[in-house]
């Protein structure tokens, strides 16, 4: 189970706070919700905060790639914060550091 | 079962066509560690592996998976267990009629409800981890033996398994490719936090990757412990294996003469 709390601190910024396990069971629903939001007009900058969430497998990284692609297609920006060392290592092992270099902020858990 | 053991094998006996092939096998597989099962060809390593992945029923003894006996698993429990493990068979066991990308997607399509695009990206990530993302549209028959083995590893990793079982990773590979595969297994263990169980008879590879070595002979565990303990074992069979001394050949001469003197058809 993973919960998603959405806040709009400014008109152009959407912050999504995830809480729970982001794994292959919870990924399909979360993916649908976030992609829908990313494709909505007006959601120019999206921040996904993982401080209270755990990425347990690589489907989490794959979904982040999809979200990044959708946001960039809208001309927006994606920021991913609060990821743990294990998720960062999965990104590195998949050699996706370059793709996420301006996306993942370094305030790791 | 030690507190760190993910799997504990207790008094396992196994039979094949009426002949006993495993005798009172017992040891533990610690979590997040590399356990190497070694021994000469025919010593029961692969049979043991088949038990551990739930492909062969236990005749007697127990294989405890976090305090539950694998032998007593229902069909749904067995399916759930198989979703937690990955297996790399000797030949890679790829589907020849599918490209590498399609091969890797199979377990994800069967066992998850992930979107096709998520599965496609995950497949590419796994192929990249084994250095084969450029070959995602190749068929297995278009690859070398080492590449097929790496592709098999990518498929075994598709579900991000907690435990990865690997049967003879170095067999049929040149020393450089084999060393690369060893390095890759250690990287994956480190990054994905997996428990690895590797079956091999390659001494160099075993001592390089193992946290624990279980040495088998004639269906029995001869020695088990950290690599240094096994290396310093006094057991004559362990010493013989480590020093690669050949067994004297035993030939039934009467039977041989009978066959050679018998007129061929």
Image: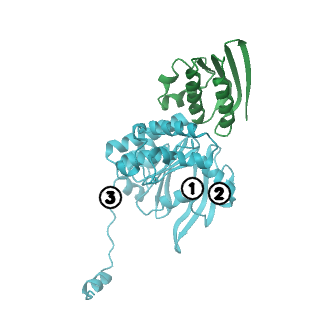
Chain colours: A green, B cyan
The answer for how far apart the CA atoms under marks 1 and 2 are is: 8 Å
To the question of a shared chain for discs 1 and 2, the answer is: yes
Give the residue number, with chain letter if any, for mark 1.
B52
Say if mark 3 contacts mark 1, CB within 8 Å.
no
Does B246 sit left or right of A97 as displayed? left
Numbered label attached to residue B168: none
| Residue B32 or residue B163, whichever sits in front | B163
Judging from the image, mark 2 belongs to the subunit labelled B
Where's residue B163, x and y in %? 56, 46
Image height check: is B198 above or below A57?
below
Please give the count of numbered marks on the rendered protein.
3
Which secondary structure, mark 2? helix
Q: Is residue A86 visible?
A: no
Quarter of the rendering containing residue B251: bottom left
Q: Which residue lies under the disc numbered 2? A: B70
Please give the name of the residue rendered at 62% of the width and 48% of the height, measured from the top-left corner: B111
């Amino acid at each position: 189970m993973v919960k998603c709390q959405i806040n709009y601190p400014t008109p152009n910024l959407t912050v999504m706070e995830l809480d729970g396990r982001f794994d292959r069971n919870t990924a399909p629903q979360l993916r649908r919700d976030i992609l829908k939001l990313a494709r909505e007009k007006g959601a120019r900058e999206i921040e996904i905060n993982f401080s209270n969430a755990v990425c347990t497998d690589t489907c989490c990284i794959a979904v982040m790639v999809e979200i990044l692609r959708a946001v960039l297609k809208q001309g927006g920006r994606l920021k991913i914060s609060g990821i743990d060392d294990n998720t960062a290592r999965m990104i590195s092992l998949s050699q996706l550091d370059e793709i996420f270099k301006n996306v993942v902020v370094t305030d790791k858990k | 079962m030690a507190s760190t053991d993910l799997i504990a094998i207790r008094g396992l006996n196994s039979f094949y066509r009426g002949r006993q092939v495993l005798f009172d096998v017992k040891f533990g597989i610690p979590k997040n560690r590399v356990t190497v099962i070694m021994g000469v060809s025919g010593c029961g390593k692969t049979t043991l592996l088949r038990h551990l992945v739930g492909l062969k029923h236990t005749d007697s003894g127990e294989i405890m998976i976090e305090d539950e006996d694998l032998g007593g698993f229902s069909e749904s429990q067995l399916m759930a267990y198989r979703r937690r493990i990955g297996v790399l068979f000797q030949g890679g066991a790829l589907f020849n009629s599918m490209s590498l990308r399609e091969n890797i997607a199979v377990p994800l399509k069967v066992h998850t409800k992930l979107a096709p695009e998520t599965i496609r990206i995950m497949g590419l990530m796994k192929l990249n981890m084994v250095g084969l993302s450029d070959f995602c549209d190749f068929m297995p028959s278009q690859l070398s033996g080492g590449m097929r083995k790496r592709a098999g590893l990518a498929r075994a990793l598709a579900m991000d398994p907690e435990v990865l079982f690997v049967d003879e990773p170095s067999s049929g590979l040149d020393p450089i490719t084999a060393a690369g595969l060893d390095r890759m297994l250690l990287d994956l263990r480190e990054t994905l936090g997996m428990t690895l169980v590797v079956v091999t008879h390659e001494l160099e590879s075993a001592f390089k990757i193992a946290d624990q070595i279980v040495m088998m002979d004639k269906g029995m565990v001869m020695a088990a412990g950290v690599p240094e303990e096994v290396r310093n074992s006094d057991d004559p069979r362990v010493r013989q294996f480590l020093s690669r001394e050949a067994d004297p050949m035993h030939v039934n001469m009467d039977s041989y003469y009978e066959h050679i003197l018998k007129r061929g058809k």
